[in-house]
Image: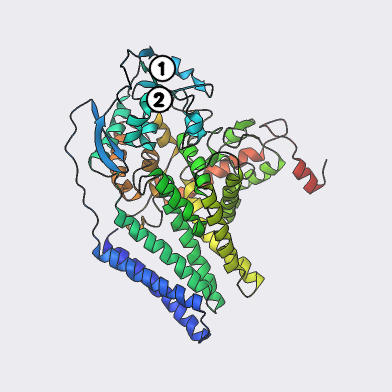
Amino acid sequence: MSRVHSSAWILYFASSIVAAAADDAAVGGESEHMFTFSMRCMTIFCAVALVLQLLFIRVREEKPAEENKDPTLTWREDEGITKLVPLIPEQRGEKKKLERYTMAEVAKRNTREELWVIVDGRVYDLTKYIDKHPGGILPIQDMAGKDCTDVFANYHAARIYKSMLPAFLVGEVSDYEVFEHVKDFRHIRQELLRRGLFETDMTYYAKMFTWTYGLLFCGLWLSTCSSMGVRLLGAVVIGVHWQQGAGLGHDMGHSGVTHKFHMDHWLGSTLAITQGLSTCWWKRNHNTHHVVCNSIEHDPDIQHMPVFAVTPKSFEKPFWSTYYNEWKSMDSVAKWFVSNQHILFYPIMAVARFNLYAQGVIQLCKPEKLHYRKTEMFTIGMFFVWMFGLAFSMPTYGETIAWLLISHAVAGILHVQICISHFSMETYHGHAYNNKDDEWYITQLKTTMNVLTPEIMDWVHIGLQFQIEHHLYPRLPRHNLRKARELVKAAAAKHKIPYVEQDFYDSNVKTLTAMKRTGEVAREAKKGEHGFFESVLWDGLTLSG
């Protein structure tokens, strides 16, 4: 958005808050606490700093490199910086003639006991590495036996090709084929790299940090004022802070800010002190979601039984969730929730953040290898101290409950945004990436929807409105996704690939309509069908059986 429009929007918002607080001060007289005063000062400081940044810091101009005309070289990025490097990494030690394998032969090596993948037509044996993978076991396991060229490029820096891949090289593919549409989408990635668009503009994130933490200070200020109405307005502002802060956490989780795995991870884990969300849990969950988007058995982001089912495929028969390591099936409780899910959707979204708190704590207590576990245990613990401390500082228990519900309901906009990106899109059983009709780019476009929004409102959607581009190129910084959209839409149109993009209202309608259709199928489910069985919990609650 333009600096002038941004400044006008921020000043309007800030003036509304100041007016409300001034009114509160008139009521409260000289009773303002030191904490309230300090938060007010920090709010003013952040507001002034943000307006100055918006007015005087220029958006960095593109500095594209020359065209690469050497087919043996390719553009890759390291810490966001574009580099021209060899397409095929050099073998280590004495160069030997590589064994040749067909795609079908590689596809058979798809278990933890023997796990091979393909990158740029070369075959790599990752069997001994899977437990050491910084991104977790599941992403590798889900791509076992498949062509990982585009997945690998989207999650790994240039140095990984040179320093790590050669050690696992076992052969090359004899019948490797690159489809025409794949060539075009890979060319888009090359163009984005050539133009330097994978490099983060740190002035953008300086503005976002100032804005997001200005909201936090403002919310804390208003939540400790003397008027109940202003305190509840503070809950609204805190909710906006959580929603906006989640955008920063999301970008860091993808190593999309500094482009350094440990730096972005540590920053995300540290910011849990204001967000309460675990980056360790998020990485395990979200990286898996990206790799197996909308897979019934493998994508945790559509495995919400017994509360939601995004498709009748979720309960047509029991299935084993490879993420949760448990069976998912229809029962009496699930039947009631899913049958009414289009009605329950927004009320559940209003409190869904509490589930994220729980998921994070559960993940931190598991014995599997995690980065910055102790950091997150401390920061999330401190988050609960200040969040519940602030809530229970309200004069009455009723206001405490109201403050908690309002703040989390406003933050629930985040959950709605995530759900509408995928819930109404195609789903499938098992693993994708088998042929021309379900390779990486086709699968991401079939399972993902953009939210059409004017540029001036991009900050509201925290980058999640460009879900298609984000899924295709997840390390691309948020502020460059709109530029990528222009290229992706053109390529999709050229190859007659559906590119689904609707405004926020229509996206919600599309999602609720799909959920209602699925609910109608669930309502007709009978015992003995759809994996439906008696629920012991339901029988106990209804005194049946």
The front one of 531 and 170 is 170
Q: Quadrant of the C terminus?
A: top right
Amino acid residing under circle 1: Met
Residues at circles 1 and 2 in contact by the CB criterion of under 8 Å: yes
Q: Residue at x 34, y 44 (%)?
A: 476
Q: Residues within 10 Å of mark 2 (few under 14, many from 20)?
A: many
Q: Position of residue 491 (x, y in %)?
A: 29, 35
Determine the image quadrant of residue 93.
Answer: top left
Tell me what residue is drawn at x 31 percent, y 49 percent: 200
Q: Can residue 423 be seen by looking at this rendering?
A: no
Residue under circle 1?
103
x and y percentages locating residue 344 in the rendered image:
60, 51
Residue at 53%, 47% (x, y): give it: 373
Question: Residue 72 got which mark?
Answer: none
Q: Nearer the viewer, residue 249 or 484?
A: 249
Asked if 471 appears above or below 382 in the picture, the reply is above
Quick one: SS at disc 2?
loop
Q: Position of residue 295 (x, y in %)?
A: 52, 33
Residue 208 drawn at (x, y percent): 37, 59
How far apart are the alpha carbons under marks 1 and 2? 8 Å
Q: Is residue 75 above or below residue 464?
A: above
Q: Identity of the amino acid at label 2?
A: Asp
Q: Which mark is residue 147?
A: 2
Q: Quick one: label 1, few (<14), some, or many (20+) residues within 10 Å?
A: many
Q: Earlier in the sequence, mark 1 or mark 2?
A: 1
